[in-house]
Amino acid sequence: MANETNGSGAESAWRPPLVYGMAIACLILGLLVGYLLRGSGSQRPAVSGQVQSSPAIGGMGQHPTPSLEQMKQMADKQAQPLLEQLKNDAKNKDLLTHIAYVYKSAHQFKEAAGYFEKSLQLDPTNVAVRTEMASCLYYSGDVDAALGQLQQSLKYDPKDANSLFNLGVVKWKGKNDPAGAIAAWQRLLATNPNLDRKPIVEQMIAEAKQHGGAH
């Protein structure tokens, strides 16, 4: 499930979707919300042990959302055949990335980051994978490590839209640095003049300015 993004294709394949979904919510609510900051009162991601299900609608019950432990069990089961393949092909970076996505989709971010890291050991210049790893590190609460990975991504590809966008998010919401976020997003717009989501980025810059960023 690895989806590589290079500088020339950043406008048409802007990821990760969780962060992009959060940006849409920003336009609606006037602040960054969504899974990235859900349940966090200290600007860091906080994942509870049980994800609450939505209330029943119209008297009809709904299946409860699985807990994180149940999601981990499902991810372990889904990853098992891939892990078996890995025993005979330990240096298959695509297989490692696939396993990482299995765990990321189940919100097992530490496990996902570990497999992304193993993939990067085999292919350190893969900016798309490194940016995904940064997201997982942030979701798991390691803000500084996430920043380090994003900065490393930008050394390989200074114009990467995903890295620049996420760098702004982490600086603002992870480090309480709206000025740093604005700088990252302004760099994103400057280096990606045809970015199709330019209005979203501009709105986020405006929001950051209202929260103490440079004018």
Image (spheres, rainbow, N blue to C red):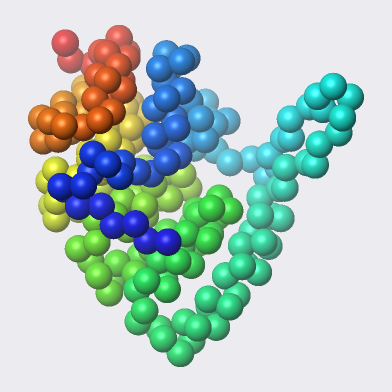
Q: Position of residue 17 (x, y in %)?
A: 42, 41
* Residue 208 in sight in this render: no
Q: Position of residue 93 (x, y in %)?
A: 34, 73
Q: Is residue 151 above or below residue 114?
A: above
Q: Nearer the viewer, residue 20 or 181?
A: 20
Q: Quadrant of the N terminus?
A: bottom left
Q: Is residue 98 above or below residue 19?
A: below
Give the residue displayed 40% in from the left and 66% down from the top. 97
Q: Quadrant of the C terminus?
A: top left
Give the residue displayed 30% in from the left and 44% down from the top. 13
Q: Is residue 88 left or right of residue 55?
A: left
Q: Position of residue 29 (x, y in %)?
A: 47, 14
Where on the picture, by quarter, is residue 182?
Answer: top left
Kindly give the residue lying farthest to the bottom in the view shown. Answer: 88
Where on the picture, by quarter, is residue 201?
Answer: top left
* Residue 56 in sight in this render: yes
Q: Is residue 6 above or below residue 88?
A: above
Give the residue displayed 20% in from the left and 52% down from the top. 6
Kindly give the residue lying farthest to the right in the view shown. Answer: 59
Give the residue displayed 30% in from the left and 16% down from the top. 203
Q: Is residue 5 above or below residue 81?
A: above
Q: Position of residue 134 (x, y in %)?
A: 34, 50
Numbered circles on residues, count: 0
